[in-house]
Each structure stands twice: as C-alpha cells, then as structure tokens.
Image: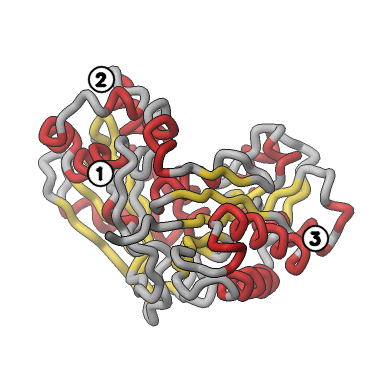
Amino acid sequence: MNAPRKIIHIDCDCFYASVEMRDDPSLRDVPLAIGGAADRRGVIATCNYPARAFGVRSAMPTSRALRLCPTLVLLPPDFERYRAASRAVHRIFRDYTDRIEPLSLDEAYLDVTGCDACHGSATLIAREIRARIEAEVGITASAGVAGNKLIAKIASDWNKPNGQLVVTPAEVDAFISPLPVDKLWGVGKVTAQRLHQLGLHTCADLRGWSQQALVTRFGKLGRSLYHQCRGDDNRPVEGGGRRKSLSVEHTYPRDLPALDDCLAQLPRLLADFTQRLARADPDEPPHKAFVKIKYHDFTQTTMECVCAAPDAAVFERLLRDAWPRGQRPVRLLGIGVRFADAAPVADPTLPLWLGDEPVV
C-alpha cells in the first residue's frame, strides 16, 4: 500500500503588492494596486487588502478601480523585484522537497510525502515554510494542506491572509460537501449561472447527478465536476512541463449577432487575460497573439500574428480580420498568446478543468 500523499499549496498574499509594501512601508496602510494606467485601458494585476475594502479586485479595469477608490495608489509592475522575491521563496521550498510544481511566481504545490523535516508533519512543514518566507523574504503566505492538489489549493484560500488550513483525509467529505460550486476549477460566471439554474449550488447538490448526466449537460467539464465534488484528485505534483500558450475564453449565454457585439466583449476578455499573463513567468516571452472565434454552429476559426507585447489594438485587429470568415452569430470568443521558447508551465493540468474561461 502506498502511503497517503501529503500536499501543500503555498500562495503568497497579494504578492506584487506585498513586495511593494515590504520595500516601502509607507504603503502598508493605504489602498495600493499594481496595474496598468487607466488612460491605456490598463487592468489591476493585484491589490492589497485596504484596496479590497473598497471593492477593488484583480483583473478589474483600472478606470473602475479608481472610481471605486479615488485615493488608490497605483504602481506599475516591477517584475525584476518580483522575480527576485519569487526565487527566494522557491529556495525555501527546495529545503523541504524537490517535488515542486510552480503555478506562477507566487504559488506552488509541494509534495512532502516522506519528508523528514518537522517529524514528517505536513502541517508543521507548511507552518515553518510560511514563517521562513515572512522572516527571510519579508512577505506573508497562506497554505492549504491536504492529501491531494484539489483540496490543498481550495484550502489555501480559506484563511487568507497569512493563515493556513489543514484538511485531513477523514475531513474531506465534510469540507467538500457544502462547498459552493463556484469554488470548483473550471466554473466561471456563466457555468455557475447554469449550475444554479439547475438547482446545483453546492458540491452536495452535484453529487445527486450521475457522471453521464453531467457529461451530457457540460461535456468534459461534467466529468471534472463529478470527481471534484467528491474531493477526488489523483494528479501528482510535477514540474518541468512546458507551456505552449496562455489564453482566456468565454462562452456567452446568448450568441453575439454581429462584429460590433464581439468587439464590445474585448475589454472583459483583455482584463482577464492581462491579469493571468501578469501572474505568468515574465521570462517566458510571447511570440504570437491570437483570437479564437466559435460560431453558433460550433465551427470555429483562429487568427494570429507575430507580436511580443499584444495590447487591445492588436486583439481588435485580429478579431476584425477573423470574424468575416464566418459572418455568423458567435457563441465563444477567446484571446491569447503562444510562446516562442516555452519555459516550465505554470500548471500543466489546467486544461483538464475546462470551463467558461480556461487557461490553455
């Protein structure tokens, strides 16, 4: 019999903002956000907790964030300092295990099964890692500890900031059963709305549906939901994968009838995409930008161009060029980039959890 796995998910708290507050303590108690300028249709990459009290959130257009919080201090990202902090955090990880799967600069899975540190206790290892990150790097981190990646990642968000949650194998059912379906991977706003319309609000509700019924209704996502609502996840912690692309997609509850309707959706797509790209490794340069269109009859087309730094104008041009290929109502839009020299993937398992806005 194999020993039960011990998985830790570590997630640094508001990472970019934490580095800025560490280096300039005067920013600690003021609303602070890292992101692009409002006059350039920028979006918020992350913000501190005083800013969140005003309703400011990641992926929000900067213009809206400033309306919600006129006193918001907005700083451009400084990736060189963020990379340095990330390297310091990962050096701490490697003191405990070499089974590390990075998700971004500021979060990772660690498999500490069989680790001798802290008498083999994953709970104590997570606590010690968090204490060292605070003492040696000057920022705080939260952790989830569980027997698989699914539960560990959900748990790490439970006691933020600067906290942790342990879910033992015996506690998985009690933890996952009342969990809102919105917390599951692959469930975006549209899918959550569809689930709610079917009376599916919690994982306990989902368990009332067979796998075949969920697959019939939701396709590949249905199979994922069937296992997630039971807390099942056998994926190993593994690094060394290679990212080929990063994208966001959205399926619309009503087809977009014309090109102008599609163009009107670009700001939201761009906000989500920019936030996710900001969390990816800045050393991994984009090579091409692309737009994906799926028409109402499920035919689809993709238009791309060579571009190292795509912005709203690039995606708008690609969409204008791609749409006439079908000239039909559109059910799905996506934008993204392909990478030239792929670096270790942030999370190679994400395509398994397809939803409204998957990262590919």
> Which of 91/103 is in front?
91
Q: CA distance from mark 3 to mark 1?
A: 39 Å
Q: Residue sitting at 50 percent across and 62 percent down?
A: 108
Q: Amino acid at mark 2?
A: Leu
Q: CA distance from mark 2 to mark 1?
A: 17 Å
Dot 3 or dot 1, earlier in sequence: 3
Callout 1 secondary element: helix
Q: Quadrant of the N terminus?
A: bottom left
The mark lying in front, picked from 2 and 1, is 1
- Residue 27 appearing in the image: yes
**How busy is the neighbourhood of tag 3: few (under 14 within 10 Å), some, or many (20 plus)?**
some
Q: Which dot marks residue 242? A: none
Q: Residue sitting at 51 percent across and 68 percent down?
A: 115
In the depicted structure, whether residue 38 falls above or below residue 102: above
**How busy is the neighbourhood of tag 2: few (under 14 within 10 Å), some, or many (20 plus)?**
few
Q: Residue lying at the far bottom in this picture: please name it.
A: 341
Callout 3 secondary element: helix
Q: Amino acid at mark 1?
A: Ser
In the depicted structure, whether residue 74 falls above or below residue 222: below
Percent across and percent down for residue 207 are 25, 28
Q: Which residue is mark 2?
A: 198
Dot 2 or dot 3, earlier in sequence: 3
Percent across and percent down for residue 322 are 25, 56
**How busy is the neighbourhood of tag 1: few (under 14 within 10 Å), some, or many (20 plus)?**
many
Q: Which residue is mark 3?
A: 22
Percent across and percent down for residue 69 are 73, 36
- Residue 45 appearing in the image: no
> Which of 278/63 is in front?
278
For this view, does 279 lie left or right of residue 343? right
Callout 2 secondary element: loop
Q: Which residue is mark 1?
A: 224
